[in-house]
Image (cartoon, coloured by chain):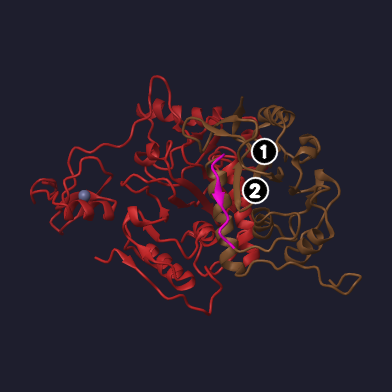
Amino acid sequence: MPGPGGALDLRPGFGDPVADSQSVFRAVLAAMSEPGTVRTVAVEMDAPAPLHPATAAVCLALMDFETPVWLDAAACTGAVRTWLRFHCGCPLVADPAAARFAVAADPVTLPRLDCFSVGSEAYPDEGATLVLQVGSLDGGMPVTLSGPGIPGEHGFGPEDVTRDFWLQRRAFEDLFPQGLDLVFTSGVGLAALPRSTLGRW
Amino acid sequence: MTRVSTAARDGGYTFAYLDEQTKRMVRRAILKAVAIPGYQVPFASREMPLPFGWGTGGIQVTASIIGRDDTLKVIDQGADDTVNAVSIRAFFARTAGVPTTTRTQDATIIQTRHRIPETPLRAGQILVYQVPIPEPLRWLEPREAETRRMHALQEYGVMHVRLYEDIARYGHIATSYDYPVRVNGRYLMRPSPIPKFDNPKMDRSPALQLFGAGREKRIYAVPPHTGVRSLDFDDHPFEVQKWDQACALCGSTASFLDEIVTDNQGGRMFVCSDTDHCETRVRAGHVESAAGGRDPGGP
Ligand SMILES: [Zn+2]
C-alpha cells in the first residue's frame, strides 16, 4: 500500500514462490528433524527491517490466512506488518495465546512462554511455533540437547536467549505432548527445537 | 535395467500437482508430526487424480516435500515395477519433472506401500509410507474422541490384552503385519501394513519417516535417531519372520522372502520381496544355484 508520502514501502516476496517455498520448508523440516543443527536458507531475500533473510523466508514458506501471527514489539514495524499482510495474508493478533506462529526479533524481551498456546491434550499439534530471531546461532549460553532426532547429545547455544528462557522451556518439557516448537533464525541460518527435545546445562 | 530416469515436467500442472496453499497446510502438519513423534496430526486431505487405496495420503506428503533437487523411488510390496508403483512414479515424473530411480541408495525420497527397503537408509533420506488405517486403537475403540483420550492418557493396556489373546489362542503373537509400536516411549503407532520383519528397521533409523493416510486425513512421523519399540511381553519377546531357505535368485538369507509359484505343476520358490536389493546382489555376483532355493513340495 502507498504510504503517506506516496512511497510504496513493500519489500518483495520470494523470487520463485513455488521452488523457494519448497526449499525453505525442507530447511525447516531438516532442522526440526535434527534439533540444534544449523541449516541455511538458500533463497534470495530482500527482507523488511528488522527481519533477517531466514526469518522472512520462514514466514513466507509457512504462514497464510489460516495462521494467526503474533509479532513482538521489535518485529512489529509498519514495513513488516504490510509485508506479512500482502505476501502471506495472515491475520496479525495482539494476543499471543491466539497465535499459531509468533515472530520475535528481540527474544530477550519475549513474554513468558505460558502466554502462548501449547495445544490441547487431544490436539497437541495446535501448540504454537515460535520464530526467534537471534544475533547468532552460537556464542550464547550452552545447552546440551537430547531426544528424538539427536544421536546421543548435541550442544546448542544461540545468542540472545536468557537463562530464564531455558528454565521456562525446561519446565515445559513436562507438558509433552503439549508444548511449543521453536525455530531460531539468524542471517540466512536457522535451527529448530521441537517440544520433544530435552535441554540441560 | 534403468537405474535413474529423468523426465520433463508437464507445464500444464502446478509443480507436484498440489496448489501452494494446500502444500503449506500439509507442510505445517508434517512439521508438527515431526515435533510430536508418533502423534497423528489431522490435515485437510485433498482429492487426488488417483483413487483411495493408491496411497493418496503418501502422495500428498511426497507432493508437499518434493523439490527439483530430489530423486524419487516408489515401491509397492518391495517392488518398483507394480502398476501402483509405476503409476505414482509416472505421476511425479510428469507433474514435478524430478528424476526417478529404482536404487535405494540413489533416492532422496522413497515412497512405499507395505515394505521398508533392505538396503539400510541413510541420513538425509525421507521414507514416505502410504497408510490405509492410521489409528492403532481403531478396532478396539471405534470412537475418535475416545482414542484421542486414550492416547492423551497413554491408556494402551487394551492393545497388550489383544496381543496376549493371540498368545493364549495360538501360543505366540499371530500379528505379523502392521505390528504396533511405541515411538520414543510415548505414542502407540501403526507402522502401516509392513511385515513385522521390517519393524526393527524403524528403530533409530538415520532417515526421516513420514506417514500419510489420505482417506483418514492423518499425518504422523518418526524423526531420525528415534526409538521405535515393537510391543511385546517378558515371556514372549518380539520376533521377526524367519525362513528355512535362502532367496532362490541372490542367495540372501537376511531379506524378507515372498513365495512365488513358478509353474502349474506346483513348483514354487522363495525370492526377495525387495527387487532392487535382489537385483543389486545378483549383479554383484551373489547367484544362488538353481536348485538351492527350490521347494520340492507339491503334487
Ligand atoms: Zn534375492
Q: What stretch is highlighted in magenta?
A: A36-43
Q: Chain B is drawn in which colour?
A: red
Q: Where is residue A78 in the image (x, y as percent from the top left)?
A: 84, 60
The N terminus of chain B is located in which quarter? Answer: bottom left
Disc 2 within 8 angstroms of ligand 1 (CB): no
The reply to whether dot 2 and dot 1 touch (C-beta < 8 Å) is yes
Residue drawn at x 34%, y 39% as measured from the top left: B197
Q: Which chain is brown?
A: A
Q: Nearer the viewer, residue A104 or B142?
A: A104
Q: Which of marks 2 and 1 is nearer the N terminus?
A: 1
- Asked if labels 2 and 1 share a chain, the reply is yes
**Residue with the mark numbered 1:** A159
Residue drawn at x 53%, y 53% as measured from the top left: B212
Which amino acid, by three-letter code, is at mark 1?
Glu
Q: Is residue B25 above or below residue B39?
A: below
Q: Is A151 left, or right, of B172 in this rendering? A: right
Q: Residue furthest right?
A: A4
Which amino acid, by three-letter code, is at mark 2?
Ser
Quadrant of the rendered image containing residue B252: top left
Q: Is B82 left, or right, of A151 in this rendering? A: left
Q: Is mark 1 on a helix, strand or loop?
A: loop
Q: What element carries label 2?
A: strand
Q: Position of residue A74 (x, y in %)?
A: 81, 49
Q: Is A122 left, or right, of B233 in this rendering? A: right
**Residue with the mark numbered 2:** A186
Circle 2 chain: A
Q: Is residue A53 above or below residue A10?
A: above
C-alpha distance separating marks 2 and 1? 10 Å
Quadrant of the rendered image containing residue B217: bottom right
